[in-house]
Amino acid sequence: TPGSVPATAVASFGTEGQGRSGLSWGNDVGAEPDSGHSRGFERTLAAVGPVLDWLEDVARAHRFDLESFRSLQLAIEEVFANCVRHNPSGAGPISIVVATDDGRVRVTITDPDTDGFDLRESADPEADLPLEERTPGGLGIPLIRKIVDDIEFRHEGRTSVTVLVKSLNSR
């Protein structure tokens, strides 16, 4: 049901209408910076559905234009799925924070137990090869790069943090 905590969620953000710090969330991109919506999700592909549902709730809370938000949602899904696929035995939940600041949406995806992978440094697939000569997969990262305006990455210890930044229209 809408607004309920999915079974795969292992942590949730603060009280409804407030961020973790208790500050009210802004309703428009470009309003005052907000403290963000945050949730941790189990490291499983079964959590992709709840991730997408939660992101829609966040988009509605911010009154984002949902059609504009869908492309960012796809990029977030791809990063989350890559965390799961390439590190299925990692410890702990994968957390996602969505915040707005200065007309932009910043999505921070934190994987607490990984060797780290900076998707900014990944080579693009060889699209000019005939289909039968291509290796399956490898299209998600170029897609992410096309969707977002900026990508930030840091890795400390065993924790990787990927930040996707995109300007979005609000209603």
Image (cartoon, helix red, strand yellow):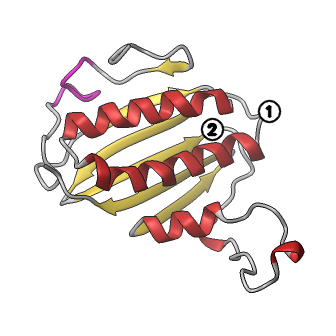
Q: Give yes or no for residue 156 being in the magenta stretch.
A: no
For the residue pair 31 and 85, the one nearer the viewer reads as 85
For the residue pair 78 and 105, the one nearer the viewer reads as 78
* Position of residue 147 measured from the top left corner of the image (x, y, whole percent): 44, 65
- Report which quarter residue 143 is drawn in: bottom right
> Label 1: how many residues lie within 10 Å, few (<14), some (14-19) or many (20+)?
few
Q: Residue 89 got which mark?
A: 1
The Cα–Cα distance between marks 2 and 1, rounded to whole angstroms, is 12 Å
> Label 2: how many residues lie within 10 Å, few (<14), some (14-19) or many (20+)?
many
For the question of whether residue 43 can be seen, the reply is: no
Residue type at the position of mark 1: Ser
- Answer above or below: position of 9 versus 138: above
- Quarter of the image with the N terminus in it: top left
Answer with mark 2 or mark 1, whichever residue precedes in sequence: 1
What's the residue at 74%, 43% (across, down)?
85
What's the residue at 51%, 35% (across, down)?
95
Task: Give the dominant element type of the magenta stretch: helix, strand or loop.
Answer: loop
* Position of residue 137 measured from the top left corner of the image (x, y, whole percent): 76, 61
Residue type at the position of mark 2: Pro
What's the residue at 51%, 20% (across, down)?
9
Q: Which residue is mark 2?
A: 112
The residue range painted magenta reads 15-23
